[in-house]
Amino acid sequence: MDGFRIPIGEWVAAAVAWVKDNLDGLLDVISFVVKFLVDGLTEVLLGTPIVVVIIIAALIAWAVRSVWMALGAAVSFALILSMGLWVAAMQTLSLVIVAALVAVVIAIPLGIWSARNDTVRAVLKPILDFMQTMPAFVYLIPAIVFFSIGVVPGLVATVIFALPPGVRMTELGIRGVDSETVEAGHAFGATPGQILRGIQLPLATPTIMAGVNQVIMLSLSMAVIAGMAGADGLGKLVVQAISTVNIGKGVEAGLGVVLIAVFLDRVTAALGAPGEYRSSLLGMLARRQTERRNVAADAAAEAPTANEVDKATAAGMRRAAP
Amino acid sequence: MVDVLCGESETLRQCRQRSVSKRPGASPGRNRCRLSSTPEVVSRGGNVTETALEARNLFKVFGRNPKQAVQRLKSGASRTEVQDAGTAAVIDASFTVNKGEIFVIMGLSGSGKSTIIRMLNGLHDITDGTVTIGGDTITGIPASRLREIRRENVSMVFQHFALLPHRTVADNVAYPLELKGVPKAERLAKAGDVLDMVGLTGWGDKLPSQLSGGMQQRVGIARALAADTEILLMDEAFSALDPLIRREMQEQLVELQEKLQKTIVFITHDLNEAMFLGDRIAVMRDGRIVQIGTPEDILTDPANDYVEQFVQDVDRARVLTASNVMELPRPLVAETAGPRTALRQMRDAYMSAVYVTGRDRKLLGMVTDRDAVKLVRKGESSLASVIKPAPQTVREDEVLMNLFVPAVESPLPLAVIDGDDRIVGVIPRVTLLAALGPGPNSTEEITLPMPPVPQAEIDAVLGEADAATAAAATEGEAL
């Protein structure tokens, strides 16, 4: 068996080289856009006064979840600031947000497509498996070849790694919508687009949001690895701490990642299940609205209560039949 | 007794005509009329019944090689024989649905009824055969045309309601109109009207989850009605509801139907429901339609053992009507006949009274034996002076359920009259009871119990016996 070897590695390397040579323009465009987005967001986050950033984070937490969550967010961000990790944390945050956005923008349409087409699903499934199980570091190599050192290869690798759960959960959510409800759309003559927008997407939203949450969490875990490719942020600090065996620096940077992770996770999880958090700002607003609507509806329904409505109905039907 | 049934098709037609002029909502019970099973029935007004929907030789095979399976089924193979090529859900189903009727497709689960109804609006592709809706064949037409037909001609009500949980009740009802492109204010106004019609006034701003099951299905019906289509497909619409609510919904559907006169195809596995709602019923088994007919046809003349077994459990009291079980009107005399004839009739029938009819067999009332005897003694020859109103009469389309109380209260066999107050038959109590029993004998000749010994005779016998005991007693005392 000594002489027998399938040179898969060489093939891939050749393919990568070919892409590098022939699609240089495209790669440049990607590189430019990504750099622009991440750097732009970082500048915005760092340009805003720190107190304002913390207040905004707290307000977001309160809006989707609760006052306690707002307090937690403020404390977390203050802790990051006190560890002197503010700049790195904001760089990581913008990397994660941009990566997650790009991943979601790619994942949701792919998920919709594969939910509606069994062939697409059959093709996508092994690719997604591959993307998820391939060690994340491996993506960094071609990414560095394509985009050289910096934030761009880190982000590209992050997007590839974070994509699969977004696609999977979108597909699951859409396929999980009650088939009779979708059938109702068909039966009343809705076009596939109307069914998607009016029935499937709204009903699949909780599942899709769970997928988005997963995408964000995976992006964050990948942000550290992106540090190896030279992306600025907490990941870079962790990598430096490893290479210098600096326990204190490593723990602090790691803690920063954890704090951001918890914040992002709680916020996106709450977004997926609005109404579950009764003390959130949005929840209170929604509740007040439904209450107002219910009062109006009850008033309109006049005397009949839920128990009596059946009798009232019979009477109503008789009245309705002249 | 059987010969009365032979006049059925005639009475059905009369009955159908009358239903048009019937006061709607007068009675929540079922005294609707039945359409005859032949599509080309000419009612007395001379209108040919219009076909709203026609299915011809429908086949539906799921699986690898549907076309081949259909070929083999057509050449006589059975469902199990083509199992290797695919699962045959519907095999050679043909039927027509007339405008304004409720056509029920009934069968157990797996009989293919849900598949058939989905082929009628193209939710399932048709493997072979044609479906025609109001003159348009929907087989093999482009998707956009099919959607147009669904928007304009056919709407549907689902077993589990299939409401959109994220929209309010009013928005759900307005959904078909939204798809038609009706402006928002207009469609919400229309939704409000339809909600009023189904008795959900004021519930428009609630979410479906805030409503009970019965109310949710009313929303489902309202949505289908809002689409304002000629044809309504109802797929086990009431099967998910509690029995009490289900009953109520059935009655409401009948009331709505009296008013709206839609063409309804109703799927159910509940025979009582089928019998209650259906103008005509198609019974399905293993993908094939085994019998199509009126509820009475199915009940009294099942096409095969399967249907017969199926109908054993049906509540016959709610399906059979007075005209199904009535006997020749007897005892009966014409007004012009004298009291002697009346007495003779009573004697022959062992009755204490007799029905009197005027011209055209119109029921005038009854004459009792006592009055007749008086007349004979007075030597009068006309019955006119002693005719009393008949105590109880029922219409010929009344279901047996509603006959029990009148039958108990009537001293004579219950008089059955038609729309012009003519007596068409009578129902003795014993016939009414016998009709409820299962089996084919229920409408055939019944052996009547022996008539009672006349009272005078009993008195005489008892008198003799008393005298004898008294004599014995006095003898004992004497000893």
Image (cartoon, coloured by chain):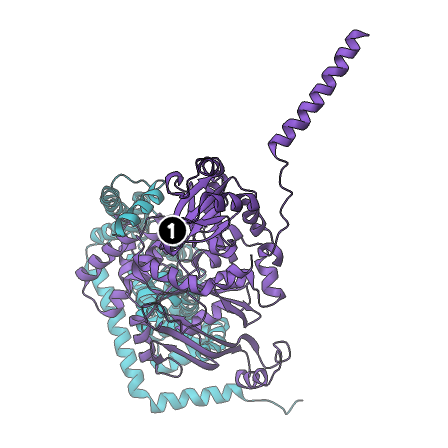
Chain colours: A cyan, B purple
Residue at the spot of label 1: B358
From the viewer's side, name the closer residue of B436 and A244.
Answer: B436
Tell me how many marks there are.
1
Q: Position of residue A99 (x, y in %)?
A: 33, 69
Residue farthest to the front, as pictured: B379
Numbered disc 1: what chain? Answer: B
Which secondary structure lies at badge 1?
A: loop
Q: Position of residue B440 (x, y in %)?
A: 61, 59
Q: Is residue B137 left or right of residue A32?
A: right
Q: Looking at the image, can residue A322 be seen?
A: yes
Q: Is residue B237 left or right of residue A150?
A: right
In the picture, residue A273 is in which quadrant? bottom left
From the viewer's side, name the closer residue of B219 and A78.
Answer: B219
A3 up-or-down from B331: above or below:
below
Q: Looking at the image, can residue A240 be seen?
A: no
Q: Position of residue A167 (x, y in %)?
A: 41, 70
Q: Position of residue B434 (x, y in %)?
A: 58, 49
Quadrant including the N terminus of chain A: bottom right
B141 up-or-down from B103: above or below:
below
From the viewer's side, name the closer residue of A85 and B242.
Answer: B242
From the viewer's side, name the closer residue of B92 and A140.
Answer: B92
Residue farthest to the right, as pictured: B479
- The amino acid at mark 1 is Gly
Q: Is residue A26 left or right of residue B394?
A: left
The residue drawn where x is 44% and y is 61% is: B278
Q: Is residue B138 left or right of residue A121?
A: left
Q: Residues within 10 Å of mark 1 (few under 14, many from 20)?
A: some
